[in-house]
Image (cartoon, rainbow, N blue to C red):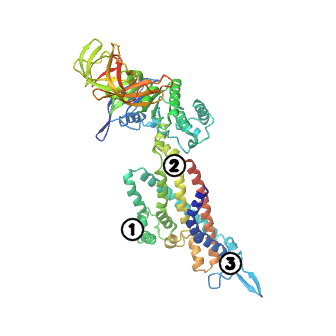
């Protein structure tokens, strides 16, 4: 028994070490950096110095105070959470029927359909975002089409590029497979006899879904939601390329602090906020998922 | 009450059901019995509404139900592995059909409590199905299926997942429950022992057809075919040709053994020249070391070929002169002495003329 627990611990050692070195330690460095002063030419100022042979520390809470001085950052942070929630919701709405359809198609066809779901991964992420730039461009066919319809009804033309809409559309597009795959993995394991039983006991199609399929699929919904919500919260490339000023997200401001403003400490503060939100989301999601798993 | 009229169903080129007709009376415990692939489950699924006949009709109280989907039929099913909803408590499981029927909260609560009492699990309402034993799950499935009083209860091999002791106990519970509530049960099984123990009537099915419908004792005693004789219980099947018919008695030339007399059932259609099979139950077959003196018995010499000591009885397989093995059952009633014969002993096999039952091949 004792031997076995040691074996198990040994098995978790490599991933644990990896996470320690490449996640925990950098996070702590960032946390520490958020209490330091910025260096004169970017980077960080020394956090201790000797004066008359005496050791002094040079740490500050200023960076954190700055976070609350204006509401710009908090609003941007809430907006990013809003984008992440909206993207997650849209991914559920679009991914659920898809996952259900795949899980209920004949076994032979499922592999092909799953392959189609992950097919976009075969081309580079940035290339796919550039493709969206072409689709959304003011001279693109999509914008033309929409504007000719709008013009027909006497409404003002719109631009898709550099807008929140463009960002959300691309976010959903990129993250949809991360919702579909865990949902499919869950739905595929459902015992079809339960649906027969529900129908036998008087439930029509709609009630069979809400009373049986949906509650049993919640662990998959939570897992998929975490896989979408967390990366979207920290998403940088999509709003950078498609968002303009309207569709900017918190990660773009973080990048700004590190690159353009050369204010590493304040960049660290914002990073910490995002990391904390992600950890919180994981904890909430894991709690729900566990509850669901215990029953399913 | 339930009428099945010339129902056929084909899967590709395979005929799962071939013009099956059947009438089940109200309050009956009726069993569909047959080997796997005989069509019994297809028929059950059709009654429940999960499958549609290619032709024919199913009538409940004189009205066709084949157009109604399963959720609109007053017919509930106990599924093979109970199909309890794992995400609902026991009480929520039982409440499910009431909720679907739109009952009020108070009514649901009182009827769920009542149903839990009925299956003698009054304090399990808050538990989840995973925490229950096999027998308890079974009872909850029954409570759930009966709580809103269906006209028919279908049971699809519900006891197959239980161990032997528990199965026997659940059989008794099912019999008593059915007697108490008086709802018509249609039971599907491939286990002939279970069918005999539970049913008022049994339909034996084979290859999409009903071979025989009868009460258990008649099915066992007077099978109408080799198939039924072989499928229900153990049976010696001795082939032969009818030489002569005189009143209720036939003289048969058994293949490789010689002539024996046998009593026939009235209207069996057996006449001189018919190729037939004498079906003979092992417990009606005697073996002894001495020659029989009885004049109303058939008897043949043989050698003990094999024996199976089963505790309460011993099964002897005796090889007759034509190389055929005949099974005979000897109860181990004498205490202390388990074996009357050993393998290789010369014995005589005998049975009364009215012990066997003749069927036409």
The residue that mark 1 highlights is A141
Q: Is residue B294 above or below residue A212?
A: above
Query: Is B275 in front, or is B298?
Result: B298
Residue B139 location, x and y as percent?
A: 54, 34
Residue B94 location, x and y as percent?
A: 56, 36
Q: Chain of mark 1?
A: A
- Local crowd at mark 2 within 10 Å, few (<14), some, or many (≥20)? some
Query: Is B333 in front, or is A137?
Result: B333
The residue that mark 3 highlights is A36
Residue A115 location, x and y as percent?
A: 40, 60
Residue B109 location, x and y as percent?
A: 61, 35
Identify the residue shown where x is 48% and y is 48%.
A190
Nearer-N-terminus badge (2/1): 1
Nearer-N-terminus badge (3/2): 3
- Local crowd at mark 3 within 10 Å, few (<14), some, or many (≥20)? many
Q: Which of the 4 image quarters holds residue B65?
A: top left
Decide if residue A285 is on the left or right side of residue A104. right
Task: Let me know if residue B68 appears in the view.
Answer: yes
Q: For the residue labelled by badge 2, is the local secondary structure a helix, a strand or a loop? A: helix
Badges 2 and 1: C-beta atoms under 8 Å apart?
Answer: no
Q: Mark 1 vs mark 3: tell me if same chain.
A: yes
Q: Mark 2 vs mark 1: tell me if same chain.
A: yes
Identify the residue shown where x is 62% and y is 72%.
A25
Nearer-N-terminus badge (1/3): 3
Identify the residue shown where x is 33% and y is 12%.
B295
Distance of label 1 from label 3 (alpha carbons): 51 Å
The label shown at residue B299 is none
Task: Let me know if residue B233 appears in the view.
Answer: no
């Amino acid at each position: 028994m004792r031997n076995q627990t040691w074996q198990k611990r040994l098995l978790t050692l490599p991933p644990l070490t990896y996470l320690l070195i490449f996640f925990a330690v950098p996070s702590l460095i960032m946390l520490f950096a958020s209490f330091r002063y910025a260096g004169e030419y970017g980077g960080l100022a020394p956090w201790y110095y000797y004066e008359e042979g005496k050791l002094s520390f040079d740490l500050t809470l200023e960076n954190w105070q700055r976070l609350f001085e204006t509401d710009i950052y908090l609003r941007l942070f809430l907006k990013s959470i809003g984008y992440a929630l909206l993207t997650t919701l849209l991914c559920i709405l679009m991914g659920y029927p898809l996952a259900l359809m795949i899980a209920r198609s004949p076994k032979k066809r499922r592999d092909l359909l799953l392959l189609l779901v992950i097919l976009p991964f075969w081309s580079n992420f940035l290339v796919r975002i550039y493709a969206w730039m072409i689709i959304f461009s003011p001279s693109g066919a999509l914008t033309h089409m929409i504007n000719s319809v709008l013009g027909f009804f006497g409404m003002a033309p719109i631009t898709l590029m550099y807008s929140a809409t463009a960002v959300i559309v691309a976010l959903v597009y990129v993250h949809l497979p991360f919702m579909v795959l865990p949902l499919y993995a869950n739905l595929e394991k459902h015992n079809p006899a339960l649906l027969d039983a529900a129908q036998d006991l008087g439930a029509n199609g709609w009630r069979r879904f809400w009373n049986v399929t949906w509650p049993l699929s919640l662990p998959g919904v939570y897992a998929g939601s975490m896989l979408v919500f967390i990366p979207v919260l920290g998403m940088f490339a999509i709003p950078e390329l498609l968002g303009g000023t309207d569709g900017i997200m918190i990660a773009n401001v973080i990048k700004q602090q590190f690159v353009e403003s050369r204010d590493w400490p304040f960049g660290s503060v914002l990073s910490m906020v995002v990391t904390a939100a992600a950890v919180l989301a994981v904890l909430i999601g894991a709690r729900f998922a566990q509850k669901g798993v215990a029953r399913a | 009450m339930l009428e099945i009229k010339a129902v056929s169903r084909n899967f590709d080129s395979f005929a799962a059901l071939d013009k099956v007709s059947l009438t089940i009376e109200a309050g009956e415990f009726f069993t569909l019995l047959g080997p796997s692939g005989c069509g019994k489950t297809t028929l059950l699924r059709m009654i429940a509404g999960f499958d549609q006949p290619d032709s024919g009709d199913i009538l409940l109280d004189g009205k066709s139900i084949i157009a109604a989907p399963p959720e609109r039929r007053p017919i509930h099913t106990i599924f093979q592995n109970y199909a309890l909803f794992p995400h609902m408590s026991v009480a929520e499981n039982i409440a499910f059909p009431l909720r679907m029927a739109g009952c009020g909260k108070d009514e649901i609560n009182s009827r769920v409590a009542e149903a839990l009492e009925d299956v003698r699990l009054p304090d399990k309402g808050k538990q989840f199905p995973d925490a229950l034993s096999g027998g308890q799950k079974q009872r909850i499935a029954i409570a759930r299926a009966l709580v809103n009083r269906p006209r028919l209860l279908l049971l699809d091999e519900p006891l197959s997942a239980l161990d032997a002791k528990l199965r026997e106990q659940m059989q008794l519970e099912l019999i008593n429950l059915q007697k108490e509530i008086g709802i018509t049960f249609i039971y599907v099984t491939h286990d002939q022992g279970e069918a005999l123990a539970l049913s008022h009537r049994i339909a034996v099915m084979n290859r999409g057809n009903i071979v025989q419908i009868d009460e258990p004792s008649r099915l066992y005693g007077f099978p109408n075919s080799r198939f039924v004789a072989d499928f229900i219980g153990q049976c010696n099947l001795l082939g032969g040709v009818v030489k002569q018919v005189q009143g209720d008695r036939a003289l048969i030339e058994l293949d490789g053994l010689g002539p024996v007399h046998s009593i026939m059932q009235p209207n069996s259609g057996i006449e001189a020249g018919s190729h037939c099979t004498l079906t003979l139950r092992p417990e009606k077959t005697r073996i002894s070391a001495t020659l029989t003196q009885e004049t109303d018995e058939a008897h043949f010499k043989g050698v003990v070929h094999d024996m199976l000591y089963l505790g309460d009885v011993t099964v002897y397989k005796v090889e007759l002169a034509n190389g055929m093995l005949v099974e005979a059952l000897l109860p181990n009633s004498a205490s202390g002495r388990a074996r009357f014969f050993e393998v290789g002993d010369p014995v005589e096999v005998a049975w009364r003329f009215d012990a066997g039952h003749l069927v036409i091949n």
